[in-house]
Amino acid sequence: MNKALRKRVYPLLDALHRVLVAMLRVERRVEPFFRPALNRLTREPIADLLQVLINLNRPDLGLGLAEEKIFPWEEQALDDIIDLMADQMRGNFKPGHYERGGNTKTHGIVRATVTIRDDLPEHLRRGIFATQRSYPAYVRFSGPGPDVPSDIQDVGFSSMAVKIMDVPGEKLMDEEKFTQDMMGVCTPTFVTPDVRENAKLQYWSLVNMPIYYFINPFDSHLREFIMQALWNETQFNPDFPLAPMPNGNH
């Protein structure tokens, strides 16, 4: 979209986006009265169907456990994400008062113990899960960001990061040589399938219209939007249950 057209169209898109966000905030306040029953009846069947539809467009790269493929466009996408998030943070925060670019709002931090069970299936016994033992850890419950709104305006999506201590093995960063980070969100799938798509989301977030990443008619991600919405609901307590993985494990 050229600059002239963008200048005419974006104010209209922004006005519609504000209406959609306002409607969402109203829905959040009445959601507790109907959402639990709706979840029990529809969430799992709809999620199963969506996963099938999403997988139809997902290529089989033939990768094994913990294997990854580096794409030619990946480095550029990562650079775009860094630039877009940096622009967003400069717009949201004053120098000397910067917050995190993502998972910005802290709901709470707790000390914890991560215990590896001794009855894990053989195919799951990798890394820290290979041997039964307990690790000291810290857990941070947070909201999505990039800003820090009041609780009633930021109750739909929650994240949980676990920093596990006393973990042996080679690490990429020297200062993290005895730790391992694990992240969880309240949805069963991540918001974007790869970093290229995430760069698109960061762009729409930068212009304060993230909903259009999902409903853009020229580059739609409606299936991902519905999958996220199934678990993106009013959170009563930051100690939220993680969404179940397809095999029933967490």
Image (cartoon, rainbow, N blue to C red):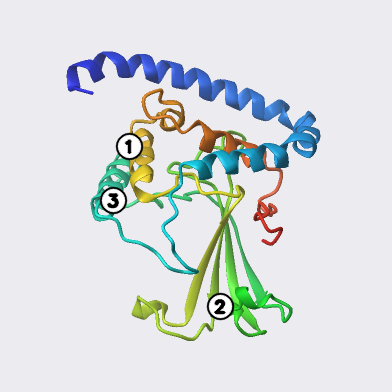
Mark 3 or mark 1: name the one nearer the start of the chain. Answer: 3
Q: Is residue 156 left or right of residue 7?
A: right
In the image, what residue occupies the spot 72% across and 26% down? 30
In the image, what residue occupies the spot 55% across and 22% down? 22
Mark 2 or mark 3: name the one nearer the start of the chain. Answer: 3
Q: Count neighbours of disc 3 (C-alpha within 10 A) and say few if under 14, some if 14 to 19, many if 20 or more.
A: some
Return the x and y of residue 126 as percentages of the image width and height: 56, 78
As drawn, the label of residue 188 is none
Identify the residue position indicated by label 2 in the image. 126
Q: Count neighbours of disc 2 (C-alpha within 10 A) and say few if under 14, some if 14 to 19, many if 20 or more.
A: few
In the image, what residue occupies the spot 35% across and 80% down? 174
Closest to the observer, 48 or 115? 48
Work out how far the residue at label 3 is from the one at label 1, CA to CA, in angstroms: 11 Å
Return the x and y of residue 217 as percentages of the image width and height: 41, 23
Q: Is residue 250 left or right of residue 61?
A: right
As drawn, the label of residue 82 is 3
Identify the residue position indicated by label 1 in the image. 203
Work out how far the residue at label 2 is from the one at label 3, CA to CA, in angstroms: 31 Å
Secondary structure of the residue carrying tag 2 is loop
Q: Amino acid at mark 3?
A: Ile
> With respect to residue 100, does 24 lie above or below?
above
Secondary structure of the residue carrying tag 1 is helix
Return the x and y of residue 209 as percentages of the image width and height: 40, 28
Q: In terms of image quadrants, where is residue 109?
A: bottom right
Return the x and y of residue 151 as percentages of the image width and height: 60, 39
Q: Count neighbours of disc 1 (C-alpha within 10 A) and say few if under 14, some if 14 to 19, many if 20 or more.
A: many
Closest to the observer, 24 or 242? 242
